[in-house]
Structures are given as structure tokens and as C-alpha cells.
Image (cartoon, helix red, strand yellow):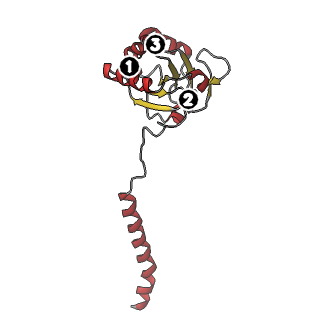
Amino acid sequence: MKRWLIALLPLAAMVALACLFGFYALRKSSTRIEPDFTVGKPAPELMLPYLEGGPPVSLLAEIKGPALVNVFASWCPPCAQESPQLMALQRQGVRIIGIDEGKAGVKDKPQDVADFLTRWGNPFTVILTDEKAQATIDFGATGLPETFVVDSRGMIVGKHTGPLLNEADVTAMMTMLKAAR
């Protein structure tokens, strides 16, 4: 009888440890999304090409804050949905930098973006393209579209996740921009 007990003791200890770690893992969430984690930090220092082509340029040099940075794609329905609000911001003199993310890591064709902008309007002062979605990652975007407010020192001071849908969203962006001067 003692032999069986001694033989089963290591197995029982392993089962007890597995249960202990299993219950701990179930109680602790390892995926924690912090959508505003880049607010209060410097805008990423990236080199991105213009949509029309050419050598990469400094994103920070193009921002020349205060400005909005809008991450979008021509294949994104919510990006089209927010176009009237972006156009309203442009009419108020807001500098908007567009970063075309492309589709699933594949660059949008410039003609696709041109067609999108012809159909929905072009609110952008500058359009850069992000073939590798590096700006999306570095800005901390969790989806498309997302709009970031960058102040005159190059700091991200605000963020709007999802499309700008109404006058209240436009007012909120204008308030953040005024505070960013």
C-alpha cells in the first residue's frame, strides 16, 4: 500500500499545481487594452512616403502641430462615414494629416484612395501612406478610423476612436485643438 502511495504522490502534486496555475490564469486577464495609452506621449518619429510616391518624409515635420492625424483606408466604410465631419474641421482651418493604412498589410493603390477622396471629399492637408501599418501600431490605434490630436510640441494630447459622427465630435476635436496651441 505504501508503494502505491509513494508512486502516486508526484502525480498528485503535479495535478494540484496544474489546478492552482489553472485557477490563477482564469482569474487574471492577460489581454488588457488601453486605447489611450499614447495620449500624453510624443507622436511617433516615422518616415513615411507621400501617397503619390517619392522618398519617405518625417511624419513629425508634416504634422507641424497643432493638427489632427487621421488613420484611414479607402476600403473602410466608417472612414467614409466620418468624411463630412473631417470636411467641417477642414473648413474651420484645421490641419489634418491623413495616413492611409492600406488593407490587411497590403498598400492601397493610389487610385483607390483618389477614388475614395473624390467620392467622399478630401479633408487632408497631406496624405502619407503606411504600407506596414507602423503608424497604426506606434500611435496605438485599435481600429480604423482613429483621429489623434497632436500639439505644437509634437505631443499626442487627445484621441478619438472610431469615426467622427456628429457635431459633438467636431466640437470635441476643436476643443482639444484649442487646448493644444
Mark nearer the viewer, 3 or 2: 2
Would you identify the image quadrant in which residue 119 lies?
top left
Q: Callout 1: few (<14), some (14-19), or many (20+) C-alpha neighbours within 10 Å?
A: some
Q: How many marks?
A: 3
Q: Which residue is mark 1?
A: 82
Who is closer to the viewer here, 133 or 99?
Answer: 99
Q: Return the residue nearer the eye: 141 or 76.
A: 141
**Cα distance, mark 3 to mark 2?**
19 Å
Q: Position of residue 9 (x, y in %)?
A: 43, 81
What amino acid is found at the position of numbered circle 1 in the picture?
A: Glu
From the image, tell me which residue sits under label 3. Answer: 93
Residue 52 drawn above or below residue 172: above
Labels 2, 1: front one: 2
- In the rendered view of the protein, which quadrant contains the N terminus? bottom left
Q: Is residue 85 something one can see in this rendering?
A: yes
Q: Secondary structure at mark 2?
A: loop
Which is nearer the N-term, disc 1 or disc 3?
1
Label 1 to label 3: alpha-carbon separation: 17 Å
x and y, in percent, of residue 51 in the image? 58, 17
Mark 1 and mark 2 in contact (Cβ < 8 Å)?
A: no
